[in-house]
Amino acid sequence: MKLYNTFSGETEEFQSREAGAVKIFVCGPTVYDSAHLGHARTYLVYDVLVRYLKFNGFVTILIVNITDLDDKVFEKADREGINFKDLAKRYTQEFITSLERLKINSINAFHKASDYLNEIEYQIEYFIKKGYAYQVSGDIFFKVSSFPDYGLLSNQTPHELILRRLNPDPKKRDQRDFLLWRSWIGKHPHFKSKFGIGRPGWHIEDTAISISVFKGGYDIHGGAVDLVFPHHEAEIAQGESFISQHPFVKYWVHTGLLLLEGEKMSKSLGNIISLKDSLDQWGPDVLRLCLLSRHYRETFNLRRNEIKGFESQVTLIRRIVKQIRKRINGFKVDHNNLPLKILFQNHINIFYKSLENDLDIPKAINALIFLLRAVDKDMASVNQDLLNEILKMLTILGLESPSGE
């Protein structure tokens, strides 16, 4: 199997660190509002990736973090007059429930940032002792100059990074430096630490979770492409500085953005389609086929009127599977020893070769649809082996067909 590695900028042969096992971390949501279709697309891609890895005999561990320590969470909780933990719990549960409804069942665990404050403190203390970080007036910054490879993931030179000037702050020794710990400024929740009262920065939350759970480096880090810089760039600097291992992550696999009618979904534009509402309207199979219909690395410009078009594919899948089952059950003689028809086998081969080639899910789906249409024209050639192959393909795509259909 080959995957595109953002770090190298090349499609590489996939080889896990441990034979037969794959560890994956995917950036989760900031739980201050409902998940939308853009979020769903990202987690669907990694769901199919894990399903395919399992099909090939790998034992997988996929974890997703929950960002519940964030200004957006705190500010919305303030507006609603509730504790930030209650707000985060509400949207965390809605998020997990929506993923379950979408048949995303490959995630082993969700980890809240608020459960890793001790690990965050430990890592920051290590960075300070080793000279990777410094403290100014209660704030703690990671010293980017201590990590020469900073910028390689996003393919930026040190000069280009200086020009980006993210979050300018006179306290910083270098404007490229990023926050590890923010001192308390008299508002929002705050926490005690060896460095004083405050709260962690965004980047350190994910590194604390991933290193704690995986006990070091791991195979794949996922998320949408807009997280490459500065978030994932910062995670590499933190991770490799902490565990003294390169690479911290072997493969950085990013999904393209989902646009709606040509624009990025945002609350200010009022063009967000929530995952929960979409599931109520369309159901999981239609949404899965729709959101997986573009290659995972492409920017997907979704138009609302396109979603309904995938209902016909769902209908075709269910109808053909039901007809094959009915015909097999009606055999008066044993037809199951007949070899698969060459045309059927060709479509099956294309399905798997597509997934092996940088997880080309749209091409794999097309192979499945062509196979079902060919079967529809030649129902006399079906047997149990063909049904088994189709059910395997559906399982990998998360379109499992109930036994009665």
Image (cartoon, rainbow, N blue to C red):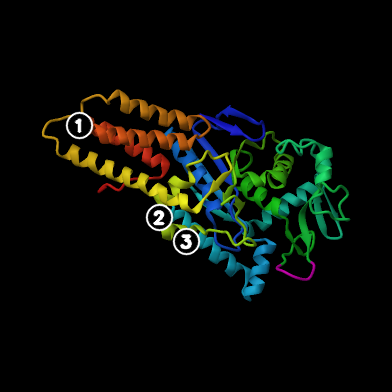
x then y, percent, for residue 288: 44, 47
In the image, what residue occupies the spot 67% across and 48% down?
207
Q: Find residue 277 and name its label.
A: 3
Pick the front one: 273 or 146? 273
Residue 88 lies left or right of residue 135; in this view the side is: left
Count of numbered labels shown in the rendering: 3
Q: Amino acid at mark 2?
A: Gly
x then y, percent, for residue 178: 78, 50
Q: Give the residue pinned by disc 2.
A: 283
Local crowd size for mark 2, using a 10 Å CA cut-off: few (<14), some (14–19), many (≥20): some
Label 2, label 1: how far apart the Cα atoms are = 32 Å
Q: Give the residue pinned by disc 1.
A: 380
Element under disc 1? helix
Q: Earlier in the sequence, mark 1 or mark 3?
A: 3
Q: Quadrant of residue 16?
A: top right
* Residue 105 seen in this snapshot: no
Q: Which residues are magenta?
A: 185-189
Pick the front one: 114 or 353? 353
In the image, what residue occupies the spot 39% across and 33% down?
367
Q: Amino acid at mark 1?
A: Ala
Residue 194 lies left or right of residue 10; in this view the side is: right
Element under disc 3? helix
Q: Amino acid at mark 3?
A: Asp
